[in-house]
Image: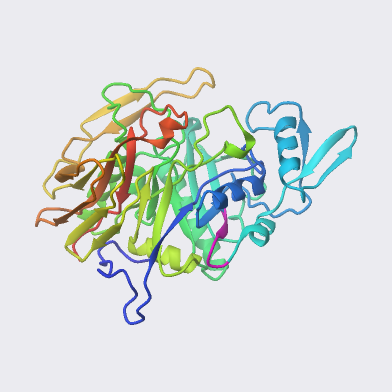
């Protein structure tokens, strides 16, 4: 896999072939009735296609939906987690999808769920819309803490997971770092057994209480190259000294990359996904965060190989509502351009950690025990301002295009850009309430170090 030290070509075209690249918008994390989503698989896929996405992956918990004879009972209400197929959603589904199959049996109604292969056949269109298989590996370690990781474009479950429940219990003597290491190794072994097709594997939502990692877990596992910098907000309460500013995930990211850069290891790249469970098509009354976070990849064609090769080079960015015109890194200078948007202003922050900066956690925040389910209190590290400091900031006026650049100083470990809008983040507009989600729309470039 390419390291972050490899410069992206300034022209963003493959050398020698003259092909021009374009941005592709995608989501690599969503759920359906195969696990705990509140939508049928074809409802989910059609939602992304109709919203103008170029690619998406269905990533249900601990399963790849391959059984063409999988039926679910229709119940009056959704019930508790995982959700039942409720009568209201079933009726909406049957009305909008004429090919849907249902049957009456034993005094009740059953409905068949489409498999991922059927979704690919029905919705995938070469060069226009790419549907990929995926899985959210969902594991529970000591003290009921979860570790979740996604993989995309591998046509099989990892060994031992196919018969697991939606949450697979792991031996209590495994730490979170151990679970991450084990999971990543199992994905790599699965890929090798399948002939190493193009694929991506990433660490999910490290900012979710009881479903998360701390920075040390990613530092201990440099083979993990991607993580979710934005995903459906967070249920972290604003407990002092944890700042209620939506920057916890950025601090996590910078702590990991400061350690990796000092060790000469590949930097950690960021994706953004909506992790959708509630979809507009089901007319849910719950907070529907469909489309609130996504990943933009620059590639010369819409194929897994082209997309994931670009991601390995760092030629992509994460977003929760801001779209960039251009990102370039020539081995020493990062350049970012944001197109004009009527009535909106943008601010480009260049962020780095200095080589001699204090990168040790300065404080710790204790998050209270969640009484409803008995999960324990937990502690998260709070890093000093020297970790992920803003080294340059350029602001534009309302409706103005903004362009800025930053050249790595001799003592910079890396540089990345965070582009902030003055518009409220879609997550909050859609009804979210996570205190650690960015308060405004943001785009994040990848971090880059000197070539």
Colour option used: rainbow
The magenta stretch spans which residues? 126-134
Give the x, y percent position of residue 203: 43, 47
Left or right of residue 170, residue 398 in this image: left
- Which quadrant of the structure image shows residue 212? top left
Q: Residue at 34% of width from left, 64% of height from top?
A: 313
Give the x, y percent position of residue 444: 31, 48
Q: Residue at 21% of width from left, 43% of height from top?
A: 388
Vertical side of 128 occupied by 427: above or below:
above
Residue 128 among magenta residues = yes
Residue 127 among magenta residues = yes
- Which quadrant of the structure image shows residue 382? top left
Give the x, y percent position of residue 392: 14, 46
Given residues 414 and 285, the one toward you in this image is: 285
Vertical side of 279 occupied by 65: above or below:
below
Q: Residue at 31% of width from left, 46% of height from top?
A: 341
Given residues 352 and 443, the one toward you in this image is: 443
Given residues 103 and 181, the one toward you in this image is: 103
Give the x, y percent position of residue 172: 50, 37
User: Looking at the figure, which quarter contains the N terminus?
Assistant: bottom left
Left or right of residue 37, residue 174 in this image: left
């Amino acid at each position: 896999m390419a390291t972050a030290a490899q410069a992206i070509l300034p022209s963003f075209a493959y050398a020698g072939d003259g092909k021009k690249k374009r941005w592709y918008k995608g989501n690599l994390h969503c759920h359906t009735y195969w696990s705990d989503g509140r939508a049928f698989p074809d409802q989910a896929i059609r939602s992304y296609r109709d919203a103008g996405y170029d690619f998406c992956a269905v990533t249900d918990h601990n399963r790849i939906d391959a059984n063409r004879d999988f039926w679910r009972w229709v119940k009056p209400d959704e019930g508790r987690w995982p959700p039942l197929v409720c009568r209201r959603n079933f009726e909406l589904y049957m009305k909008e999808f004429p090919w849907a199959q249902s049957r009456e049996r034993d005094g009740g109604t059953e409905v068949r769920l489409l498999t991922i292969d059927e979704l690919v056949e029905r919705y995938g269109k070469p060069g226009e819309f790419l549907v990929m298989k995926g899985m959210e590996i969902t594991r529970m370690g000591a003290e009921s803490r979860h570790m979740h990781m996604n993989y995309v474009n591998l046509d099989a479950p990892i060994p031992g997971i196919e018969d697991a429940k939606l949450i697979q219990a792991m031996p209590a003597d495994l730490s979170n770092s151990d679970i991450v290491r084990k999971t990543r190794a199992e994905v790599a072994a699965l890929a090798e057994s399948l002939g190493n097709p193009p694929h991506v594997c990433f660490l999910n939502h490290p900012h979710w209480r009881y479903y998360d990692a701390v920075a040390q877990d990613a530092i201990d596992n440099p083979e993990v190259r991607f993580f979710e910098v934005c995903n459906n907000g967070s249920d972290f309460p604003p407990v002092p000294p944890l700042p209620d500013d939506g920057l916890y995930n950025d601090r996590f990211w910078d702590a990991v990359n400061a350690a990796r850069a000092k060790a000469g290891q590949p930097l950690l790249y960021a994706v953004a996904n909506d992790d959708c469970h509630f979809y507009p098509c089901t007319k849910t009354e719950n907070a529907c965060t469909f489309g609130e976070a996504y990943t933009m990849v620059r590639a010369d064609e819409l194929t897994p190989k082209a997309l994931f090769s670009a991601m390995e080079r760092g030629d992509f960015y994460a977003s929760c509502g801001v779209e960039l015109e251009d990102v370039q890194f020539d081995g020493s200078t990062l350049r970012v351009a944001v197109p004009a948007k009527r009535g909106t202003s943008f601010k480009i922050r260049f962020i780095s950690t200095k080589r001699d900066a204090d990168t040790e956690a300065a404080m710790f925040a204790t998050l209270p025990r969640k009484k409803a389910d008995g999960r324990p209190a937990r502690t998260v590290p709070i890093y000093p301002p020297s970790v992920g400091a803003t080294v340059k900031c350029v602001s534009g006026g309302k409706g103005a295009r903004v362009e800025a650049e930053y050249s790595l100083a001799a003592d910079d470990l890396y540089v990345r850009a965070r582009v902030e809008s003055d518009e409220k983040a879609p997550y909050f507009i859609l009804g979210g309430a996570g205190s650690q989600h960015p308060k405004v729309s943001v785009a994040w470039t990848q971090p880059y170090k000197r070539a």
